[in-house]
Image (cartoon, helix red, strand yellow):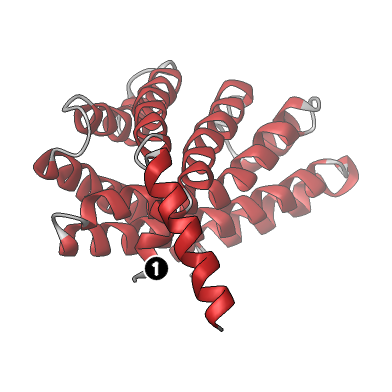
Amino acid sequence: MTLLATPVRHPRLAAAGLLAAFGLSAVSVFLQPDLAGDPDQTLATLASGPLPAVSAVTFLLAQLPFIVAYLAIGALVETRHRRLGLWGTCLAVLGAFGHTVFGGMSLLYLVMAQDPADRTLYATLITDIQSSPVMLFSLAGLAGTVIGMLTLSVGLLRSKVVTRWVAPALWAFLLLEFVGGNISKYAGYLAVLCLGGAFTALAAHVAGSVKPTEQSATTTALGTASQSA
């Protein structure tokens, strides 16, 4: 039994992870302010109200259910394409780790924004951070998420374990999220809707993947094993 098999043994947990990842991401995206501009303007925007803080916190919190979601998707793919499932999951989890570090940095920026007296100093510090090796974590978040989710989506398409439109929906999410933002400010909203459609379909499939008779048999087997021990 591999680590990727864990979500199969706990389908409700896997479904909850998929839905929570989408829900928290949606809140983060829809409340995220426009942070274009130099670091001083970014700090001023972050200090403009509570919504930027909610966006930053939900982005950070979303990374944990994303890991559960990636494990669930990897488990589906692994049943027929072991390498795609394993490598896709590893890369996607690496992406979640990188985004977790980046999310922690965002919380630090929020604290800096609340001190307008030293904002110029903090802006200089942010500039230094953005040109330091620390940004390798941000790169890991970007590359891991894109390559990992792309690998998993190809695995879903090839394994045919879910309806065919799920993989293209994930591709649309990646394109809109990581490329479309340079074209339109609405791309992020469309991206999260694509993610929501795909993750909702995956959650419904995972939640219904274990039949009541199978659950009963598993419970009986576990009970027998416990009594024997």
Occupied quadrant, residue 217: bottom left
Name the residue located 86 percent from the left edge and 41 percent from the top edge. 114
Name the residue located 50 percent from the left edge and 74 percent from the top edge. 225
Let me know if residue 141 appears in the view: no
Q: Position of residue 133 (x, y in %)?
A: 48, 70
User: Where is mark 1, residue-wise?
Assistant: 3
Let me know if residue 60 appears in the view: yes
Q: Position of residue 196 (x, y in %)?
A: 42, 25
Question: Dot 1: what SS?
Answer: helix
Q: What amino acid is at disc 1? A: Leu
**In the rendered image of this protein, does residue 56 appear above or below residue 78?**
above
For residue 8, side relative to residue 111 (left or right)? left
- Image quarter of the C terminus: bottom right
Name the residue located 58 percent from the left edge and 76 percent from the top edge. 227
- Image quarter of the N terminus: bottom left
Occupied quadrant, residue 139: bottom left
